[in-house]
Image (cartoon, rainbow, N blue to C red):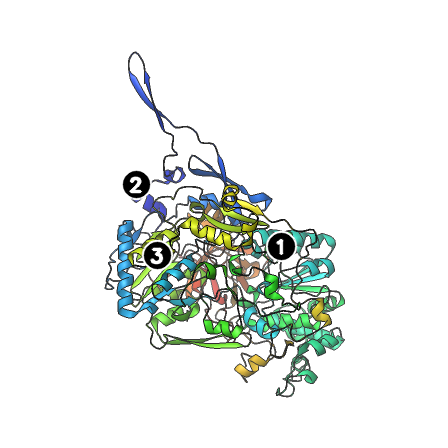
Amino acid sequence: MLKTTAGLVVAGAIGVGLGYGASELLRPTAPPGGVVTETVTTASQTVATTVTPVEEEKRYVGMNKESGATWMYVKNGRVTRTENFMGIHNSLFHCVERRRLYSPNRVKYPMKRVGWEPGGKSSVANRGKGEFVRISWDEAFDSIATELKRIKEKYGPSAFLFTPGTHADSWYFHCKYLLAHDFFSYYGGYTTVFNDGYSWGAWRTSGTATFGFDGAPGGGQGIGGDVENNSKMIVFWSTNPMVTPMVAMCAGYEAGKQLVRLKKKGVKMVFIDPHLSDSAKKLADKWIPIAPQTEEAMALAIAYVWITEGTYDKWYLETHTIGFDEEHLPPGAPPKASFKSYVLGVQDGVAKTPEWAEPICGVPARTIKALAREWASKPTALSAAWGGAARHSNGGQWVRLMLTLLSMQGYGKPGVQLYWGTVGPSMFHAPYERGGYPWPLQWGKRNMSAVFHNTTGLISSPNYTFSHIVPKEFLDILGAKGQTLFDVARVSNPVTQYIRDLWLPESILNPPTSWSHNQGGVHMEFHYPEKGYSEGKSILLAGGSYLTKHVNTNKFIDAFQSPKLEFIWCIDPWWESDTGFADIVLPAVTNLERNDVSCIGLYDVYSTKCVDNLWESKSDWDIFTELSERLGFKEKFTEGLDEDGWLKRIFDYVDTSKYISWEEFKSRGYYKWEVPNDWVPPPPIIDSRFYQDPDPRWLGTESGKIEIYCRTMSKLYPDDPEVPPIPKYIVPPEGRGSPLEKKYPLYVMTPHTKFAYHASYQLESWLRDEYKVKVGGFEYQPMFISRKDADARDIKDGDIVRAFNDRGEVLFGARVTEKIMPGVVATWYGSQPYSPVEPGKPYSLDRGGLINLITRGYLVSKFDTQSCTTCAAQVERWRG
């Protein structure tokens, strides 16, 4: 029996307990071949020696997480070193792929929780305590198959729960969420824990309602050519553009290069953010610290300056938008309901002046006026992050105000753009102009220009590509059409019912639950369980981490420990935060232990299996194939193809196959797309054509115009102060100005880190050494706190601090700095591992810096389907 003290089995301890020491990590897992035995005879004795020929170093293309590739060098069955692929710089965390492969946190063998047996009657008391024993693959497969049969017979297939989340450690074929989806579909169906993402903020909901598309990169704004050629200033509002896009490696690399070029050209860069980010340190001409959740007040004050000084595009607002002033309200809107009336105080008696905004947002009125005047004086682009809205309790207001400010300056006029990303050559591969391997979130968009522009050059409805997961009714309403790459490869049945991921704990513990989903003018109501379907009784953990990804995750611990979940099984290469709660844990291979296809920049790549499977790990394909055989549908699941057969089917589907043979592609490892000399990047959706001709066919809104007064919101939520038809400043339920401000006076920001990709790479020592605060032999996640707030709490740099609120308590290592405004603290989200002082006990004090234990866990508004990823808390020096 193996135990840990943190609700997490440490793989190093498993290795020692099973006779597999740490030094074994660096040895080949099988003889390299060519072993020769030589006998040497002397006068006194005969000595037998074994000589192993030294294998030449070989180079392979190894696939990184989600996007990109690295040259992997292999010698004697072991990866010895790595290099950037074709000169494309890796993200910082991608530089540790070899370390990650040989990580002491690898799951080495199939494991079973102590005390668990098939049948649904085992105690769940030790879930999360990390008590596991090693079992054979046969026992693991038999146990899983037995449980799945029992649960299906007793409850029906809707009792199977699975999250088809994005950002799994997989790619086109070995893709956890697609393979699992197909596995369950062929077994009769399952309940999907519908993941609507966090990165979207409120752009896909409020943004779509305002513009008819999400107004962000997913809506085609990821092109910076107009900005590079025409903008004289960029306002970066709640965004860190040199860090966050690096998850996409090539795109992030090109974005960084473009920003440096813009800086050298003299484009002025203003950063509005509570924390001086890495991007602001390098690029900012001006940093404006602002209190979180109050940005709407500053935006309204900027609009006030423009209105009262007449420095806005009146013609554009009259012809391209509805609801800016009284003369252009939609039919049926009440008087004094326009945006202009609200800003000037006609509506509520409060003029939204810079002086009004100053005590709310903490930005001096003179600074707001100066920025507003300079912004209006030159072509200015706005870079407003997706996730910027997710830190607001009503992020839809911030999104709508960002788009309203752009509209007030003539969105689409040369240089007046919503800026994201680059105009580099990789945009040719994006794939806008050809049909190679699309990025995972663009499956099936073989010609994105056709998706975003119809035959007349006007915008058509966006194609939501996860059609195998999203409710068919939702797709029908959206008008999404066309096949995705994997719809062609895999013919799958629809899921049986849906749970919103945020509602998962409540759905397990206290059903029934209900929630709504909005996207633009589409509104759908969901209920769980649906009539005639069972509640969830089993959940598969694969391709993501609930505890490190979601919010208010102590509730997820409650759900995992509920006996209502009769069986939890997990497929993962590493022991991470969720695995300690499983009944059976299966060791999965990494990307370097299997073949697959990928893309980076202008390259389609064949990712080669670099080494034999370490320990007893298996690929997801092999795991699901074996289970499908035991459950009686192997032929349906595999369609008679092995891994190579499926990869070739995918290869034959994309345009790469027209220019290189399958065997040559595998041998070379890549195919480079050449950019035609006459190729120009496609324009942004809102460009000079829309500025000159506001044809209603351009936008997908009900009016065909930019809806500053949103008719969808006014119809769905009439007279609801949380969903006003025009964007407003709304006092948040936590944070500055809220009723909880005295009890929990510090607002907690949870930004991306350059050292990890969400929860992935958080366990790698080479990266942790760069940022963890080491105290007493333990590595604490850093929490950045202003010197003023630290002095008031007797906190010194390097102290252990406790951040807490009504949802839980977490320990951090203090980093006292002048680079964050008073009243705000910041820590990177996604910390691993979850390390409770009392393993297996919900709401235990966590030493691992898992901030999501105390984040809010509510939607950013009734209309917006994304969750607020931050919170308010108190922070004190830890003396325990």
Report which residue position mark 2 lands on: 19
Q: CA distance from mark 3 to mark 2?
A: 39 Å
- How many neighbours does mark 1 have within 10 angstroms: few (below 14), some (14-19), or many (20 or more)? many
Q: Which residue of the protein is positioned furthest toward the top in this rendering?
A: 43
Earlier sequence position, callout 3 versus callout 2: 2
* Spot occupied by residue 53 in the image (x, y as percentages of width and height): 41, 28
Q: Which residue is at a point 50% across and 71% down the rendered structure image?
A: 475
Label 3: state its secondary structure: helix
Indicate the amino acid at tag 1.
Phe
Q: Residue 705, located in which quarter of the rendered image?
A: bottom right
Report which residue position mark 1 lands on: 428
Indicate the amino acid at tag 2.
Gly
Using the image, determine if residue 643 lies above or below residue 791: above
Q: Which residue is at a point 44% across and 31% down the rendered structure image?
A: 55
Residue nearest the observer in this picture, 426 or 356: 426
Residue 756 visible: no
Report which residue position mark 3 lands on: 635
Label 2: state its secondary structure: loop
**Which of labels 3 and 2 is toward the front?**
3
* Spot occupied by residue 798 in the image (x, y as percentages of width and height): 49, 52
Residue nearest the observer in this picture, 654 or 67: 654
Q: CA distance from mark 2 to mark 1?
A: 51 Å
